[in-house]
Each structure stands twice: as C-alpha cells, then as structure tokens.
Amino acid sequence: MESSPQPAAAARTTAATAERSDMVLHVNGVPYPLTLDHRTTVLDALREHLDLTGAKKGCDHGQCGACTVLVDGRRANSCLLLAVAQNGRRITTVEGLAEGDRLHPLQEAFLDRDAFQCGYCTPGQLCSAVGLLAEAADGFPSSVTPDTAAPGAPVPLTADEIRERMSGNLCRCGAYPRIVDAVGDVRDGGIRTGQDVAS
Amino acid sequence: MSQDPLPSANPGPTATRSAPASPAGASVARREGREKVTGTARYAAEHTPPGCAYAWPVPATICRGRVLAFDTRAALALPGACTVLTHENAPCLAPPDDPALELLQNDRVPHHGWYVALAVADTLEAARAVAAAVRVTYETETHDVRLTAGHPHLYTPESVNGGYPAISERGDFEGAFAAAPATLDATYAVPPLHNHPMEPHAATARWKDGHLTVHDSSQGATLVRDELAALFGLGKDEVTVVSEHVGGGFGCKGTPRPQAVLAAMAARYTGRPVKLALPRRQLAAVVGHRAPTLQRVRLGATHDGVLTALAHEVATHTSTVKEFVEQAAVPARVMYAAPHSRTGHRVVALDVPSPSWMRAPGEAPGMFALESAVDELAVLLDIDPIDLRVRNEPGTEPDSGRPFSSRHLVDCLQDGARRFGWLPRDPRPAVRRAGGLLVGTGVAAATYPVYLGGSDAEAHADADGGYRVRVNATDIGTGARTVLTQIAAAALGVPESRIRIEIGSSDLPDAPVAGGSAGTGSWGWAVHKACTALAGRLRDLDGPLPADGVTETADTRQENAEPSPYARHAFGAHFAEVRVDTVTGTVRVHRLLGVFAAGHILNPRTARSQFIGGMTMGLGMALTEGSTLDPAFGDFTPNDLAGYHVPVCADVPAIEAYWIDEDDPHLNPMGTKGIGEIGIVGTAAAIANAVRHATGVRLRDLPLTPDKLLPHLARLS
Ligand code: FES
Ligand code: FES
C-alpha cells in the first residue's frame, strides 16, 4: 500500500465565501442553519449534511422521482433544486410525514397494500402521493382530467388520475398496481393535505 | 384491511395436496415495512462515517485502446480535491475472479465507459468537479460493437450461462423439418436491456486496524466479502460487507461490482472512509446488461399441430473482458415434446460493456422468441394457441428424458384461460374495436428452472423464550426477512413474533446470493435445518435452558451437491389484452393476468408483489425498454432513465397474479421453486401475440414501439 496524503480539509469552514452561502432550510418543522456549497442540491443537503436519508437518489437528473419532497406543500424533485435557492423554504421529507409513532394514512396504506418491495422508491412515492392529493383537491388538472372539468374545482381522483399523477415516480420493483390501490384507500378515507404536513 | 384482495391460493384441478409441505403459507407483512415507509431503512450510501470522503469515477471516452497519459494538475488544484487514483498510483489488486473487477490496474481500455480513474474529494460536489477536470490522453484502436447474424467472429462457446451446453441435439432436426407438413421459420430480436434498479450501485468503505468494512449495495454480501478479501490479500475474517437494505438488483448486483472495489481502494489510499455512489448514467457500462439476442426459431408440425421438429438458434454478444452467453435457447429444451430438436448458441466478443445477469437470463428473451413462434404456428394452422400447447405437452423433460418433479403448465393455461375469459375468442385479427382502438388478446407460456445453493444458518434459543435466526441472506425487495422468519417459525413451532432474524451482513453465517430465484429455497433450507435441529434439542432438554441459551448451526452444502433425478422447473401462463391506436401506432396494455405453478407459495402477499413486479418488467420489455449501442461512439445511447424507458405507473393497468399451489416433494423441505423471475418470462410474448391478434401485424423485434408498428397500420386506420 502506498502512503496516503493527509486529508486537506478535515476542518471545514462554515463561513460564506464566493462558493458557499449561509441559508436556513426548514425541514420537517425544524430550522437548520447551513453554510453550503452553491452546487449542493436540496437532496444532497438532506442526505449528506442533515443525515436525513429518507429522500433517495435514483438518478440525480429529475428522471425518477425517488428524491421527491414537499416544498411549501408542493411536491418537487429535490435533486433539481439547489439548496441555496431554497433559503427559508419549508421542506417536508418522508421522515416528516408521521406524527411521532402515528403513521401518515398513506404510510399505513402502503403497508396494508404491500405497495413496495425494495422500498427505495417508496419515500418519493409517499411524498408524491401527499402532493397529489393536495393538487387534486386544489383543482390542478392532469393530462387525463376531462376537458369538461370546471376550472379550479377539486378533481375526482379516479384510478387513471392516480396513475397519471404518480407517473413521475418510477418503481422498478413494479409496485404500481398496489400504489394506486393505496392512494385510492386514502382518497376514500380522507387525508390531511400537503399544506397541513408542510406546516 | 390487510387481507389480500385475492384468495391466497387456488388449488388447481390436478394440484391436489392434503397437507402443505410446511405450515408456512400465511400472508405475513414485511418485517422491515415500517422502516421503509418512514425512511429509516438505510441503504449502502446512507452511512457517512466521520471524515468520510466522496469518490466519483472517470469513465473512458474511447471504446478500445489504452491510456497514454493522465493530466490531473487542474483536477487536484480544485478546492476539496483529495486525490485522483489511476493505474499509476492505485493499490495493486490480486487478479480477480471476474476480470471486470480488474480496476485501475493497467492502461487497457476494453470498452467505452470502462473506469480509468477515480476522483476523491472532501465533498460530493468537489469529487464530481475533480473527476470532470481529469484529462486523459488515449491511443485508440478500431472497434466493433455491432452484433449481426452473419458476424464473421461468431463462435460456439463451450457452455452458456448456467453451465448448460451451448448446443443440444436430439433426433434429426433437419430431416424432420424438411418432411414436416407445416413449417415456420422466423427470426426474433431482443435488444440490449438494462436492469436499472432504483438504487444505483453504491458502497461506503472504511479501514480500521487492518479490517475492511464495506456497506455495499449487493445481492450477496458473502460473495462480495470473498472477492474483496481475495483482491486485497486479506483473510475472510478481515473483511465485513453489509447489505442490509438493497434498493433492487434484478441480477446486476448479483456479482461484486466496481463500486465496492473502488471505494475500498480509495479508502485504503486516503486513510479515510470513502463513499461512492455510481452515477445513474454510468451504470449501463459497468454493471452488466442483458445481451442482445438474434434468435431463429424453426418449427415443423403436423396439420394437427403436433410438433415434429423444433430448432432454436441464438446469436448474441459478449465483451472482450469476459465471456457471458445469454442462454436463450435453453428453455426450448424444457418446453415441448418435439422428437427432433436442435438448440444452440453462438457468441461474438465485441468491444462492448460486459453483459451479465438480468432477471430470468435466458428464459426472458428465449421465451419471447419461442412463444411468439408457437403463436405463429397456431395462426398458421388455425388452432387455438392454448390447444396447440396442450397437444405438445411432454411426458418427460424433452432433452434429458428425466421426469418432471412437478409440471402444471396445462393447469396454468386452463386456469388462466378461465379467469381471463380467453374463450370465446375470434382468432381473426383486426376485427375488434373499443373506443376506436383495436383490441387483441394473447397468451404465452413461461418456465424457469429451480436452482438451489448450499448455505449456512444458525438458530438460537434464548433462555427467556425468544429465538434468533442468523443467515447472510439479502432482501433486495423480495421479502426474504419475512419469509425466512415464517420458515423458522414453522420449524420451531412458535409464533413469528418470538423470532429475531438477522440477515444482510457477511459476519453472519455464509449464504449464496439473492439470484436465480434461489434465495428462499437455499437460505430457507438451511434455516429450516438449523431450526429443526434446535427444536429437537429443546425437546430433549431436561430442565430449563442454560443462561446463554442453545444454538444450532446447519450447513446444506451436501444436500445441495446431490444431483436430482428430476427435471425441476416452475411453469406459468401469461395472458394479455392490448389496445392499439392505429393513428399513432401506440400499444397500451389493458390487462395482464398470470397463473404460475412454482411449488408451495410461502407468503401470498409478498409472492404476489414479486409476480406482479416481474410481469411489469416484462411489460417494459415488450413495449418501452430497448437499448442501442451506437456504432461510432460504442456505448449505450439511452444510458439514463430519460432515454431508457422503464414502465411508469400510467403504463401499468390492472395486473393479476394467481398460482396453483404445488405439492412437490423433490425440491426442499419447504417445497418451494422460486418466484422472483418467472413473472417476466412469458409477458413480452403474450403482449406481442396480443398485438398480432389486435392488428394482424407480427412484430418480431422488441420493443413494440410505434415506429415499428405504424407503417403496417395505414390500411387499418
Ligand atoms: S433523484 Fe431526483 S428525480 Fe431521480
Ligand atoms: S419498491 Fe423497489 S423501486 Fe419501488
């Protein structure tokens, strides 16, 4: 084995520089003051700096949805958000969905329906489903919403609507039919909206 | 509401069973489910030891040649840069078992995307920037990445994946084919396919007091431990590999992969823990792929549809790094009773990334061709495709003559037909419409062999009435933790809640990989044996348990080394209904239904998820998934999830999976056959056959994309 160079920067500066900025991210209701590289995404801030590894990295390119979190109550691919641009935002990750030991109804539904296998896409699916329910309630149409739907009125979540709206979240294990069932269960049983869990 | 929406098992007409082979068989919820839905289950890249550095690989940008020089000055000048490992400074490795792991050891570039350097830095962002700033000068040689049926360097290998002979012949195929009253001769093509588990390959490695610990995303930590120990010249007790939660694998994590080796090298070189998560866009080149296959199938039959001659001949590629031959003609040795048969494989070593295992290697592409051909013959002879298959049901395994340990293919076909509503079916194409779309139905059979491997396991009874079972199984999403606990509970005769199960670390008793649909059978056998021994010991015990409890260990290598006199395979039947838009050429699957005969099903809940998951991947194979090798730049063009289309939620309709619970005493104490792969096997052919029924167009090249279908549809729209 060759002799190894000593780590150059064991002690990291926390002061803002041309490359780094101070910011506050509110994650699951907790304000985290951070000084981060401008290149750091929200996803990497969560996973590498806050040890919140619930949000997953599947592609780092906005192609898979594994990193989905809620930003001010709306779902977003956190791998596409630079942390420095989210200063002051309220971010909800899968770790923030349950209330103590009481799981979010979607988490319960995913367990009940066996709506996952490896579980790697699951945090993103859950956050996405929370966002989906809020979007439909707020009248956001999808590409399968009938043209005749009243603008702004809540969109009824048919199975086709759920499938369409969950299609930004890939699941290579193929849990889709059960994910649709699980979201349908919560639709039928009532659920808190994304805004609620983000606050 | 945790009851399953469907009956847990449906005994088929001939699958009578008095008592189950094992009391296990309940729909038990996943043990780690809560961790997975709360985000607390940690995967390989989610361990960040203090002082952890980050690595980012540098892939070759040529397809063949060698590295002349590296210029790392600009890279190392970047803030946070730690080092750049290349073959000039990387730790020396012993020659690996798998030549694809000979990383940073020499200047050779065998294919585009091969790793030539590894950047290490204080942060992820810095590591990526350092990697991008490494300048490499190459000497390039001409390359060839094009598989063609007439490639001059195609050769017949000694054996194909799985250890099967490359060629198998019985009777006189050519003579029988020439004399057959009805013949079919067709060539099918399956493109390269990518596994793309949702968790990219990742490893976090650290050295402490000479001991190497690696959290690795793998399908088998024992194998990774053994390989790392050999590469670094360590004893097996000096290496620990942990694969506690794994975000899917589907074969591409079944062998040790570069991330574990590179992370360990970098950690050794820098003296720091190192985390390496392979970027998604690099995966296709370094973690294996399903090799493309060109498959010629020739069938000769009587006018009644009785096969007299069957040939299945496959051409495929491998890399110059190692020989891997997709065994696509092997299922034709199992399926139908043709007295004259020839099955064979030829392969050409191209300057391509090394192919490897992908879910149902051999069976998935091979059965697309064979089951499409059987459907073509059924159309030709105007015989119902289910009837045609029933008429060719063999009494014994055609190639070997061995009796089947159990074979319920006909039951799967008939039960599936009833559930699906196969009949009445007008065989004429392009005569059914729904909402302006053409409608068609298709059927295909599936098969997958029973593999088993020897394993160790340990069962322990605590003095306080609890039990602990240890085995280095890997749960890649299959529900291994859960089903092994069920097996242990059944053998011990105690409730599952009393059992702690430990899996996913090479410090546990050695076990084979989660692969070949062999996990439950192999690990479960050892768990069953250890628990049975423990139960016996406890029965014989006079008085209370000793304070430190009682432990039994088991090793099933001997049982598994004995060859079975039986041909052991799972079977299944797939049914598909498609809708085809004649204006856009788009095919949408309306419904999929599968019926499987795969031994005793231990956990209907998790089993159904696996069957459905396999069928979903088969849907992708049929309609959306297909990679291409660019002849000029020599690598896969669709190398990420935007270019390579795995099915999304909107692509996947209602999928139903059922099974015939078999009572097969010739397998293992649980009576299981393995269920992880058979779900993909017949799906693509069933869909392609349905497209033919819907449109009259027979497509033989996967995937069935609009550009291929549309030119044939003009007359129908
Ligand atoms: S990791 Fe963000 S979309 Fe894939
Ligand atoms: S559960 Fe494995 S990717 Fe969705």
Image (tube, grey):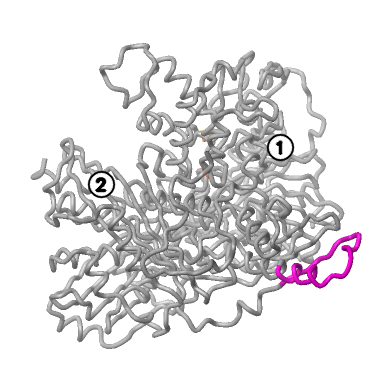
Q: What's under tag 2, amino acid-wise? A: Val
Q: Is residue B180 above or below residue B592?
A: below
Q: Find out if the beta carbon at label 1 lies less than 8 Å from the nearest ligand 1 atom.
A: no
Between B618 and A16, the residue placed more toward the observer is B618
Give the class, few, some or many, for how many residues have Cα within 10 Å of label 2's Cα (few <14, many ≥20).
many
Residue A167 at x, y percent in the picture: 42, 34
Q: What's under tag 1, amino acid-wise? A: Ala
Give SS at disc 2: strand
N-terminal of the pair, mark 1 or mark 2, is 1
Q: Is residue B122 above or below residue B11?
A: above
Q: Which residue is at the far left?
A: B715
Tell me where the magenta segment starts and ends, as one range: B532-554
Residue B77 at x, y percent in the picture: 70, 35
Q: Residue at x 24, y 56 (%)?
A: B689
Kindly check if marks 1 and 2 are in contact, taking CB atoms under 8 A apart as contact: no
Between B698 and B559, the residue placed more toward the observer is B559
Q: Residue at x 72, y 54 (%)?
A: B499
